[in-house]
Amino acid sequence: MDEDLDALPHEALVAEVRKLRAAIRQHRDSSGHDLCWHHPDLWALLPDQTDPRFTVPDWPQFMRGCVRYRQSLDEQAPDAPRTGREFED
């Protein structure tokens, strides 16, 4: 799947690594309500472009997943700062 990398010269490989690292850092540095979004811009960095066909959970299941995700943040990052900021479009 990643055979395209085999033919890239060193400089192009370094540029690709820098681009991917920047995207990973941007995703890693997401905070607050930005943690709740999927990131198609990250997927777009892959050379194999597809039309991602994902399944969206119904509202009750989705909300339970959101609550579980938030609970996991308490478990995995108990000392992370908290905010009362509301989500704004």
Image: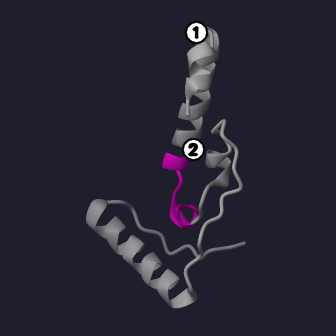
SS for dot 1:
helix
Q: Is residue 8 magenta?
A: no
- Circle 1 sits on which residue? 10
Amino acid type for the residue under numbered disc 1:
His
Q: Look at the image and tell me whether residue 14 can be seen.
A: no
Amino acid type for the residue under numbered disc 2:
Gln
Relative side of 49 to 68, left or right: right
How far apart in space, not on screen, are marks 1 and 2 (Cα)? 24 Å
Magenta range:
27-36
Please name the predominant secondary structure of the magenta segment in the image: helix
Q: Is residue 30 magenta?
A: yes
- Which dot, 1 or 2, sits closer to the camera? 1
Q: Is residue 37 above or below residue 70?
A: above
- Circle 2 sits on which residue? 26
Quadrant in the picture for the C terminus: bottom right
Q: Is residue 27 above or below residue 66?
A: above
